[in-house]
Every structure is written in C-alpha cells, then in structure tokens.
Image (spheres, grey):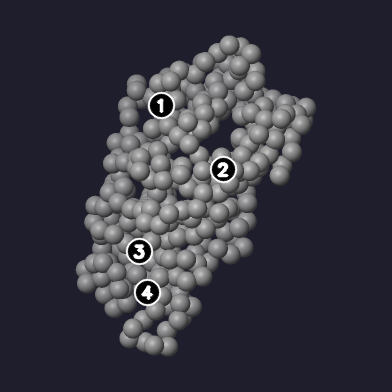
C-alpha cells in the first residue's frame, strides 16, 4: 500500500518521505561538499553533517509540516549536536592511531548494519539513496563509522576503570535498553488514519490553508472524544476510509523511517498530525494518525548483548570523567566553525 509522500529541500538536498516507502523518482541534486568545521586542522564536511542530520530532519519535518520556528529551533540544536560529536571524534582519533590499535572490519560491518536497521528501517536501498543525496560515498560512510567506533574504543580504554557491572546491574540495564536493542525491522503496527487533500473537488472554495485548518479541527474533535472511525468515513479521502481509516498489522518497513520513528515513539492512543504530504509551499494533503497497537520486534537475550550492556553500564559510571576529558581536550584544541 502506497501513501502520498512528504518532500522538502534542505542544504541543497532533495528529501522525499511518505507513509509508504521512500522512492527516488526524481534525480536529486548533489551538494558540492564544503567545510562545516575544523578541529586541529582536521576537516568536518557539510556533507557528513547533512547525512547524519537527515533522519532527524525528516522526523522534524513530519512533526512540523509548516517548518516554522519550532522546527528550525529543534533542527539547529540537532545540527550543532551532530557537529560537536564529529569534532569530538576528530580530537581523539590521533591518540588511538598513536596506540597502533585497529578496529576490526566485522565490527564496522555490524555497526553499519545497525545504523541501516535503526535509521532506514533495514532498507539498503533507502540508505544508499540518502548517501547519494548527501554526496557521500559508501567508503566515506564506512570511514565515519570507523571513527565512531574509535571514539567508543578510546572511551572504553581510558574511562572504564570503575568496578565491573554486577549481575543485578546488567539485568537492570538490559531491561532498560532491550526495547532499543530489538529487531525493529520486525515491528508491526495498527493505526487509524484520516487523509485530507489540499484541494477539494467538491468545494471549489477550499484552499490548502482551509484544508489544513479542517485537519486541525478534526484533531481537536478527536481529542475531545470525537469518534475517529466516523470522522474518517466522513472526511478521509485516503485508503481504508470506508473502514474507518484502519490499517492493521502494517510492517514498520512499509512506513517511511521518519513516520515509523514517530508512530513507534509516541504512546499508543496519541493523535499525531497534521502531517503534510508534498512540498510545504504546495502541499498535496494532510494526515491525521492515531496508533491503536504496537507489536515490537523481538529483543535479543541478555546473553547475546551482554558485552553491549556492560559497556553501557561502564559508560554511565564514567560519564562525568569522560565529559571532563572532552572539555579539557576541546579547550586546548583549535576549533573553527564555518
């Protein structure tokens, strides 16, 4: 089942997302790479930042279809966080190199697979398409992933002197994180949906603004106790409108990564929307969604992820020391933002 898509342009990147699978029906312009920052002469490129920011930006665009002040404020925070993370990595990589240590290829492969599953619903095609849009090669992304693992390795090497995690600590931490460690490609979801087109053939006076307002009014009615199914039958122009807008046992992989993230993050019963499809300046329509049930994919047993959980416990115990270390090396470093 395919739904209308949400699209936008940012930093010269054409991004398309929708309630159905992301497609690359139009050739996307590739931004010429530039410098986002320098740390002790090491360059962090704008393409690196844009690629890492893309999943978060897609989510924010879906949550804030008008791309107003709140969207830009949250995007600015997310961008700066990513940029600082990339800078921090550069500042500690040289120490790792001096140790003569290496990151094994299988660890890099596993981390890339994890990122594809997490940010792109396990879709290699969508991941590759975003690499192309961001002007990054697969080799460059592999290098970025290696840098990330180097940062983790250096933290483990120098800041995990605390007492080893006890069985009780491991179990507690596992229960806290096992949902995040699950196989999200096997997630399923039931939801209700109302689709309001930006134009209405039955009402020639309707405008995108009036249709957007209708969607907002419907959300208000629903939140006040209005019957979602009846409102869907009356107003929705989308698939399954006659069935009250219900979509049952849809795979997370049938949704765009941004929409999937939103629906699986929001509590069951939350009304989400209006989410605009099409360009913000020329929307195709607006979506209202309420999650009925979420069926999470299976979580791995503790024995399989014991090493990861031990590292999480150690990172938590050493977080204060690690933050002081980062502040110290940043204070001595020559950092320039562009």
Residue 27 versus residue 96: which sits nearer the camera?
A: 27
Q: Which residue is drawn at 55% across and 49% down?
A: 31
Residue depth check, mark 3 versus mark 2: number of the one nearer the observer: 2
Name the N-terminal-most of marks 4 and 3.
Answer: 3
**203 w.r.t. 144: above or below:** below
Residue furthest toward the top?
100
Q: Residues within 10 Å of mark 3 (few under 14, many from 20)?
A: many
Question: Taking the image as drawn, is residue 177 in sight?
Answer: no
Disc on the earlier residue, 3 or 2: 3
Residue closer to the observer: 88 or 36: 36
Residue designated by label 1: 109
Q: Earlier in the sequence, mark 2 or mark 1?
A: 2
Which quadrant of the figure contains the N terminus? bottom left
**Badge 1: how crowded within 10 Å, few (<14), some, or many (20+)?**
few
Label 3–label 2 contact, CB within 8 A: no
Eye-nearest disc, 2 or 4: 2
Q: Distance between the residues labelled 4 and 1?
A: 43 Å
Distance Cα–Cα, label 4 vs label 3: 10 Å
Q: Give the Cα distance between marks 3 and 1.
A: 34 Å
Mark 3 lies on a secondary structure that is: loop
Residue 217 placement (x, y as % from top left): 44, 76
Question: Which of disc 1 and disc 4 is earlier in sequence?
Answer: 1
Which marked residue is nearer to the observer: mark 4 or mark 1? 1
Q: Are marks 2 and 1 in contact (CB under 8 Å)?
A: no
Q: Which SS class for mark 2?
A: helix
Indicate which label's residue lies in the foreground, 2 or 1: 2
Q: Earlier in the sequence, mark 2 or mark 4?
A: 2
For numbered disc 1, what is the local secondary structure? Answer: helix
Mark 2 lies on residue? 47
Q: Residue at left 42%, top 32%?
A: 112
């Amino acid at each position: 089942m395919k739904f209308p898509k949400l699209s936008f342009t940012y930093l010269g990147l054409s991004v398309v997302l929708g309630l159905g699978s992301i497609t690359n029906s139009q050739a996307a312009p590739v931004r010429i790479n530039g410098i986002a920052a320098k740390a002790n002469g090491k360059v962090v490129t704008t393409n690196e930042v844009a690629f890492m920011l893309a999943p978060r930006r897609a989510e924010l665009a879906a949550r804030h279809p008008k791309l107003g002040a709140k969207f830009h404020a949250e995007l600015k925070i997310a961008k700066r966080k990513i940029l600082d993370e990339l800078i921090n990595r550069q500042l500690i990589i040289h120490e790792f190199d001096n140790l003569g240590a290496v990151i094994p290829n299988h660890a890099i492969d596993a981390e890339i697979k994890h990122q594809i599953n997490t940010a792109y619903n396990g879709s290699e095609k969508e991941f590759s398409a975003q690499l192309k849009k961001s002007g990054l090669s697969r080799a460059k992304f592999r290098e970025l992933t290696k840098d990330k693992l180097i940062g983790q390795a250096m933290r483990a090497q120098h800041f995990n002197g605390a007492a080893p995690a006890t069985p009780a600590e491991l179990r507690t931490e596992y229960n806290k994180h096992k949902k995040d460690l699950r196989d999200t490609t096997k997630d399923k979801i039931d939801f209700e949906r109302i689709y309001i087109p930006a134009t209405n053939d039955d009402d020639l006076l309707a405008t995108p603004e009036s249709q957007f307002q209708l969607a907002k009014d419907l959300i208000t009615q629903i939140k006040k106790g209005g019957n979602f199914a009846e409102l869907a039958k009356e107003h929705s122009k989308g698939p399954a409108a006659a069935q009250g807008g219900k979509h049952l046992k849809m795979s997370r992989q049938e949704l765009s990564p941004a929409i999937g993230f939103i629906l699986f993050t929001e509590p069951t019963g939350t009304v989400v929307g209006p989410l605009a499809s099409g360009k913000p300046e020329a929307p195709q329509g607006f979506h209202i969604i309420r999650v009925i049930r979420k069926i999470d994919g299976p979580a791995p047993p503790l024995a399989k992820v014991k090493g990861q959980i031990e590292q999480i416990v150690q990172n938590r115990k050493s977080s204060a020391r690690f933050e002081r270390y980062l502040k110290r090396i940043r204070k001595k470093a020559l950092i320039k933002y562009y």
